[in-house]
Image (cartoon, helix red, strand yellow):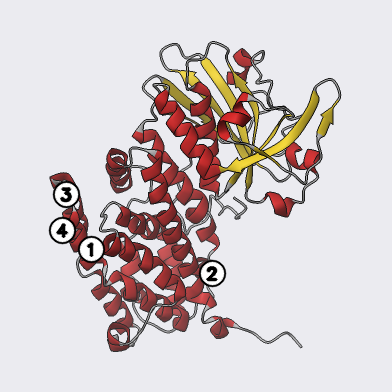
């Protein structure tokens, strides 16, 4: 959430603008409308102005804009039934009221500005809380924070919200006494998803899997644009030795791709899954040979890479995620965390990236530099966006990750793979930084 966004004019990345306001089918009868920038006067809140949930202390301001507005809407009538805002807790009214240090709130999301229509159908508040708090989970937050009345309220009781023992009671003239309360996100998301289902509003699988893309966007696609390999290419400072190291590390896991996908074919229980992984396997055959040819064009003997070299720690982390998915859990769907992370990055590379990389290679005195960059250029064609191959994976997952428990299982391993991928692209330069180190100016 704090990573610097790459400029839209950057020639390295082909990015697709994400709409600020999106609508998802959350249940058979309810839609969720998300505004990715909290608004001072949201239009969907106008009809709920008299329905503020008395349990919650509404914020005095929304100067802190790191968060989202979430509304639950009746699909048939288009009427807003519930509304809330979820914000990164640091810098908000929650911090002001509690006087907690920003460092104590970096893993917390503030759930506030809560409105629920008195005649909303059963399960509406649960859908609202789930939709808002899963957003916080995609940011990497672990706990939810609330400012609530200093009573044993129905919401606090139902979800086991715990008062923060070290924070004094908040007395607000004209409004009453309030307490800072909290609970773990994993517990809240489980409870709200179960409550929604029991109320006849089970969450749609297609709604659940949208969190996968949001998680990758926040945990990988945004911060990786600042990874040292890509900033070095952009600045033209990437050295031959660093590039060779990058190709070496890429080879060490790419060469296992077809073997892992072969296991996925074997463990797939349905024709649909087997067909998917057979197609994926066919597109990955001998990709490591492309890397070997890139190395040969650079004048390197690939024998060391093929027979002796070992993965660095980030590569091993990424490899462990995919190997455990199919080797231990024997779950081909879990293995999709690997291509979603790895191919998601290379799929966002733009032709402008190749132009800059080839310029770096040419600066080392290499003739026909494009013959040394064929592996990365071959992945430019991969669609890292929200349609095509990417959407095909999400559609497949939506058929199988049909509840919160299965989704969370996938997300935890996805974050391991995404973190490994991010660290990989940093390590390709950082591990061998000496090649670009300079003594201080005299």
Q: Which residue is mark 4?
A: 266
Residue 324 appearing in the image: yes
In depth, the one of 328 and 66 nearer the eye is: 328
**In this image, 119 relative to 53: left or right?**
left
Tag 3 secondary structure: loop
Q: Which residue is mark 3?
A: 269
**x%, y% of residue 297?**
31, 82
* Measured Cα–Cα span from mark 1 to mark 4: 17 Å
Q: CA distance from mark 3 to mark 2?
A: 41 Å
Q: Tell me, yes or no, if residue 25 can be seen here.
A: no
Distance of mark 3 from mark 1, alpha carbons?
Answer: 22 Å
Q: Is residue 203 above or below residue 378?
A: above
Give the class, few, some or many, for how many residues have Cα within 10 Å of label 4's Cα (few <14, many ≥20): some
Residue named by callout 2: 228
54 horizontally vs 256: left or right: right
Sooner in the amino-acid sequence: mark 2 or mark 1: 2
Circle on res. 392: none
Q: Position of residue 133 (x, y in %)?
A: 54, 38
The residue where tag 1 is placed is: 284
Q: CA distance from mark 2 to mark 1?
A: 27 Å
Q: Secondary structure at mark 1?
A: loop
State the residue at coordinates (48%, 61%).
419
Q: In the image, what residue occupies the spot 56% across and 36% down?
A: 36
């Amino acid at each position: 959430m704090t990573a610097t966004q790459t400029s839209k004019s950057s020639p390295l990345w082909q990015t697709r603008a994400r709409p600020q306001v999106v609508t998802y089918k959350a249940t058979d009868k309810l839609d969720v409308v998300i505004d990715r920038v909290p608004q001072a006067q949201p239009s969907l809140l106008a009809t709920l102005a008299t329905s503020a949930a008395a349990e919650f202390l509404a914020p005095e301001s929304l100067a802190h804009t790191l968060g989202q507005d979430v509304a639950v809407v009746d699909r048939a009538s288009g009427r807003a039934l519930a509304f809330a805002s979820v914000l990164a807790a640091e810098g908000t009214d929650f911090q002001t009221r509690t006087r907690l240090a920003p460092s104590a709130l970096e893993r917390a999301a503030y759930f506030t500005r809560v409105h629920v229509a008195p005649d909303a159908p059963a399960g509406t508040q649960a859908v609202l809380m789930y939709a808002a708090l899963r957003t916080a989970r995609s940011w990497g937050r672990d706990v939810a924070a609330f400012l609530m009345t200093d009573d044993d309220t129905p919401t606090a009781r139902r979800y086991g919200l715990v008062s923060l023992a070290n924070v004094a009671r908040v007395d607000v003239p004209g409004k009453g006494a309030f307490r800072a309360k909290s609970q773990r996100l994993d517990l809240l998301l489980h409870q709200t998803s179960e409550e929604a289902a029991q109320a006849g509003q089970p969450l749609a699988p297609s709604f659940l899997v949208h969190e996968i893309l949001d998680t990758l966007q926040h945990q990988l696609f945004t911060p990786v644009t600042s990874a040292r390999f890509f900033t070095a290419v952009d600045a033209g400072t990437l050295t031959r030795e660093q590039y060779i190291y990058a190709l070496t590390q890429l080879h060490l896991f790419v060469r296992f791709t077809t073997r892992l996908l072969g296991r996925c074919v074997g463990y797939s229980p349905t024709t649909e899954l087997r067909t998917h992984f057979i197609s994926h396997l066919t597109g990955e055959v001998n990709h490591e040979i492309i890397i070997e040819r890139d190395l040969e064009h650079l004048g390197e003997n690939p024998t060391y890479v093929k027979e002796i070299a070992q993965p660095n720690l980030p590569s091993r982390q990424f490899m462990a995620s995919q190997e455990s998915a199919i080797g231990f859990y024997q779950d081909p769907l879990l293995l999709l965390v690997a291509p979603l992370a790895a191919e998601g990055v290379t799929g966002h590379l733009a032709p402008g990236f190749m132009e800059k990389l080839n310029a770096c290679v040419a600066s080392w005195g290499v003739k026909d530099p494009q013959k040394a960059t064929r592996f990365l250029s071959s992945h430019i064609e991969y669609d890292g966006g929200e349609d095509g191959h990417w959407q095909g994976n999400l559609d497949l997952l939506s058929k199988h990750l049909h509840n919160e428990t299965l989704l969370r299982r996938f997300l935890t391993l996805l974050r391991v793979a995404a973190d490994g991928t991010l660290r990989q692209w940093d390590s390709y330069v950082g591990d061998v930084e000496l090649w670009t180190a300079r003594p201080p100016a005299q």
